[in-house]
Amino acid sequence: MKNKNNYIKKIIDEALNNVAKRKQKSEMSELDMFKAVARSLVVSAIKTLDEIEALAILCDECSKDKELMDKYEILYHNLDYLKRYCEGKV
């Protein structure tokens, strides 16, 4: 559990640092900070999802499971939409 908390803290710190490079912290609204953190977490989740997809392709049984692949596609779509929303592209 401690490793997970450290990992999440690291992602949040990186997100805030990236946004701070573009704006001064005094200019950042709480919403901007939230969107930056949310985007960073979503990008990390999409990378993990891509790794899971690669493993599922290697596993014949997993790639043949239509319901599992449909759920994967929905999750990927939702994460991608959230990422684009946080980037202001929606």
Image (spheres, helix red, strand yellow):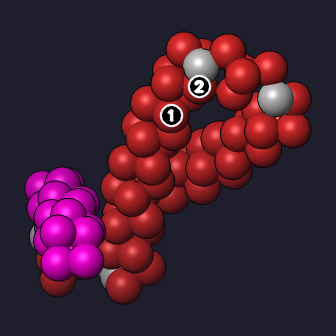
Give the residues drawn in magenta, as a range. 1-23
Q: Are marks 1 and 2 in contact (CB under 8 Å)?
A: yes
Callout 2: helix, strand or loop?
A: helix
Q: Is residue 21 left or right of residue 46?
A: left
Q: Is residue 18 left or right of residue 71?
A: left
Q: Nearer the viewer, residue 17 or 88?
A: 17
- Residue at (44%, 30%) from the top-left corner? 51
Q: Nearer the viewer, residue 62 or 41?
A: 62
Which numbered marker is on residue 56?
2
Image quadrant of residue 69? top right
Q: CA distance from mark 1 to mark 2?
A: 6 Å
Tell me which amino acid carries mark 1. Ile
- Residue at (78%, 39%) from the top-left corner? 68
- Residue at (50%, 24%) from the top-left corner? 55
The image position of residue 23, as x and y in percent, is 19, 63
Q: Quadrant of the N terminus?
A: bottom left
The image position of residue 26, as x and y in percent, is 17, 83
Q: Nearer the viewer, residue 56 or 81?
A: 56
Q: Residue furthest right?
A: 66
Tell me which amino acid carries mark 2. Ala
- Residue at (59%, 25%) from the top-left corner? 56
Q: Is 3 part of what is drawn in magenta?
A: yes
The image position of residue 46, as x and y in percent, is 48, 41
Image quadrant of residue 31? bottom left
Q: Is residue 6 left or right of residue 82?
A: left
Number of other residues with Cα within 10 Å of mark 1, as a class: few under 14, some 14 to 19, many 20 or more? few
Q: Which residue is mark 1?
A: 52
Callout 1: helix, strand or loop?
A: helix
The image position of residue 37, as x and y in percent, is 34, 67
